[in-house]
């Protein structure tokens, strides 16, 4: 299924002008589209709007549809959209395995199914044997892999990537970007990635640039 944005516009609190011109975009299953633009144009706000995390005070117009439903009519927990943030945002009080299990879809909550799903995710992430590890002991790349696999275990219908690779060094950035986009494409999930980096745009299937 495609992720469709139609005439989306955002106006920041206490501002009279939109952060960017009305945006219409369709992201196909398995496709990653990179959204670029100058700082302050609203790239991360666009991700927050789609994911349901936009702070109060913004004025929004347009529709965001996924599987025939306008996501803007739903609370964040009902949107079935995964988000990969810059800081990975793992639960510090849970082990790596419990972090992964937290993302499991409802039909994999049985003990055996949960264990098998977590083990498979760790295998895919190249982290076999890490289930009992404390997230604080992981490297930046390892944390990012766990965060991505946790999102994918929830079987999202779309994926959002918010400057997720910006703090990684050059070699790790290339590795993690390829890892993330490969797993998203394999699951035929439409993905929207915001970035200021030209190499992120080149790695995506398509790039658009926001302007006022």
Image: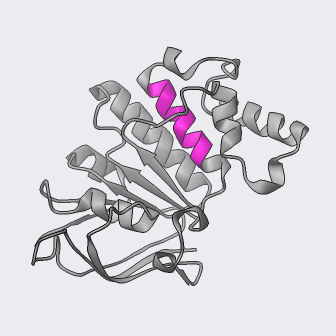
**Residue at (59% x, 78% y) in the render:** 67
**Residue at (11% x, 72% y) in the render:** 15
Q: What percent of the width, then of the height, locates residue 185? A: 54, 55
Q: Quadrant of residue 199?
A: top left
* Left or right side of 149 for 101: right
How many marks are shown on the rendered structure?
0
**Residue at (50% x, 64% y) in the render:** 190
Q: Which residues are magenta?
A: 141-151
Confirm whether the magenta stretch covers residue 183. Answer: no
Q: What percent of the width, then of the height, locates residue 155? A: 66, 56
- Which image quarter holds the C terminus? bottom left
Q: What percent of the width, then of the height, locates residue 140? A: 42, 24
The image shows residue 30, relative to residue 161, as above or below, that is: below
The image shows residue 179, relative to residue 127, as above or below, that is: below
* Left or right side of 62 for 81: right
Confirm whether the magenta stretch covers residue 146. Answer: yes
**Residue at (82% x, 36% y) in the render:** 116
Q: What percent of the width, then of the height, locates residue 174? A: 36, 34
> Is residue 35 visible to the viewer in this orientation of the structure?
no
């Amino acid at each position: 299924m495609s992720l469709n944005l139609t005439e989306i516009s955002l106006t920041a609190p206490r501002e009279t002008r939109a952060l960017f011109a009305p945006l219409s975009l369709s992201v196909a299953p398995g496709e990653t589209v990179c959204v670029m633009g100058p700082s302050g144009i609203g790239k991360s706000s666009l991700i927050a709007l789609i994911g349901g995390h936009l702070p109060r005070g913004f004025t929004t117009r347009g529709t965001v549809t996924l599987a025939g439903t306008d996501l803007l009519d739903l609370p964040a927990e009902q949107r079935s959209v995964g988000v990969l943030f810059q800081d990975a945002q793992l639960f510090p009080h849970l082990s790596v395995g419990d972090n992964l299990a937290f993302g499991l879809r409802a039909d994999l909550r049985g003990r055996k199914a949960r264990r098998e799903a977590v083990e498979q995710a760790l295998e895919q992430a190249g982290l076999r044997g890490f289930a009992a590890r404390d997230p604080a002991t992981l490297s930046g790349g390892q944390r990012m892999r766990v965060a991505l696999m946790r999102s994918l275990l929830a079987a999202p219908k779309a994926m959002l990537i918010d400057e997720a690779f910006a703090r990684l060094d050059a070699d790790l950035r290339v590795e993690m970007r390829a890892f993330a986009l490969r797993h998203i494409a394999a699951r035929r999930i439409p993905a929207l990635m915001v970035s200021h980096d030209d190499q992120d745009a080149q790695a995506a299937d398509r790039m658009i640039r926001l302007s006022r």
